[in-house]
Image (cartoon, rainbow, N blue to C red):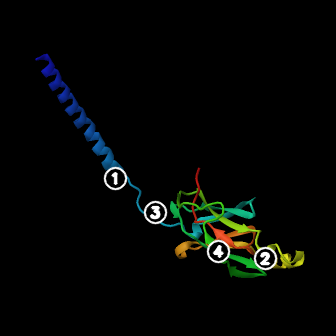
């Protein structure tokens, strides 16, 4: 008889435990669903400030890092592939992009709170025939014809432009760009 009452007590305790634990679990799930992130608007050009951070090199490639800082008052989503324009000989040109994703990888989209930064990566090469044949004079001429300064980043979906001064990019061997985003840790 003692063994049977112990089983009943155990079953009753187990049932009570499941019910008690089950109630908070449902509440947690309900609160998570109600607290889910609403749609976040894309970042606009007039809410972003661009800064050239620096350049690195590896195996014939240059990687240019550009910081995009949310200087607006609201959170926005930074994503997509931009168009890039550059200045050469006092004229503005849209730069041909050879590949989405760079030698250094690509970036996932990110959400930028005010005063938080995202980034854009540009990748160029210096190991193509245009820059390695024909002597120094020819190479200098090709490089000059493909070097751009003061870039404009045209955000996707006509969301405005971000202007970037202090950068000089030679795209004679092509240009690869990352998605707008953040690589994180």
Q: Report the side of 111 relative to 119 (left or right).
A: left
Rendered image quadrant of residue 171: bottom right
Q: Find disc 1 in the rendering and name its residue.
A: 33
Quarter of the picture containing the N terminus is: top left
- Cα distance in 3D space between marks 2 and 3: 44 Å
> Which residue is most to the left?
1
N-terminal label among 2 and 4: 4
Q: Find disc 3 in the rendering and name its residue.
A: 40
N-terminal label among 4 and 3: 3
Q: Report the side of 159 relative to 24 (left or right).
A: right
Tell me what residue is drawn at x 56 percent, y 62 percent. Answer: 72
Q: Crowding at label 1, few (<14), some or many (≥20) Cα neighbours within 10 Å?
A: few
Callout 1 touching callout 2 (CB < 8 Å): no
N-terminal label among 2 and 3: 3
Tell me what residue is drawn at x 15 percent, y 26 percent. Answer: 8
Callout 4 touching callout 3 (CB < 8 Å): no
Image location of residue 152, percent across then percent down: 66, 73
Callout 3 touching callout 1 (CB < 8 Å): no
Image location of residue 131, percent across then percent down: 80, 73
N-terminal label among 1 and 2: 1
- Cα distance in 3D space between marks 3 and 1: 17 Å
Q: Crowding at label 3, few (<14), some or many (≥20) Cα neighbours within 10 Å?
A: few
Q: Find disc 2 in the rendering and name its residue.
A: 130
N-terminal label among 3 and 1: 1
Query: Which dot, 2 or 4, sits closer to the camera?
Result: 2
Query: Which dot, 1 or 2, sits closer to the camera?
Result: 2
N-terminal label among 1 and 4: 1
Query: Which dot, 2 or 3, sits closer to the camera?
Result: 2
Q: Find disc 4 in the rendering and name its residue.
A: 98
Q: Is residue 28 above or below residue 3?
A: below
């Amino acid at each position: 008889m003692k063994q049977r009452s112990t089983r009943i007590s155990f079953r009753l305790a187990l049932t009570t435990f499941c019910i008690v634990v089950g109630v908070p679990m449902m509440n947690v799930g309900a609160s998570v669903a109600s607290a889910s992130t609403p749609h976040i608007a894309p970042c606009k050009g007039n809410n972003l400030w661009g800064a050239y951070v620096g350049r690195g090199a590896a195996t014939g490639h240059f990687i240019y890092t550009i910081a995009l800082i949310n200087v607006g008052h609201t959170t926005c989503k930074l994503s997509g592939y931009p168009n890039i324009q550059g200045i050469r000989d006092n004229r503005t040109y849209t730069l041909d992009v050879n590949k989405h994703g760079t030698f250094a990888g690509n970036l996932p989209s990110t959400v930028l709170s005010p005063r938080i930064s995202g980034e854009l990566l540009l990748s160029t090469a210096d190991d193509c025939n245009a820059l390695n044949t024909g002597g120094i004079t020819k190479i200098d001429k090709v490089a000059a014809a493909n070097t751009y300064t003061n870039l404009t980043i045209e955000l996707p979906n006509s969301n405005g432009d971000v202007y970037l001064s202090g950068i000089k990019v030679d795209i004679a061997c092509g240009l690869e760009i990352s998605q707008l985003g953040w690589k994180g840790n």
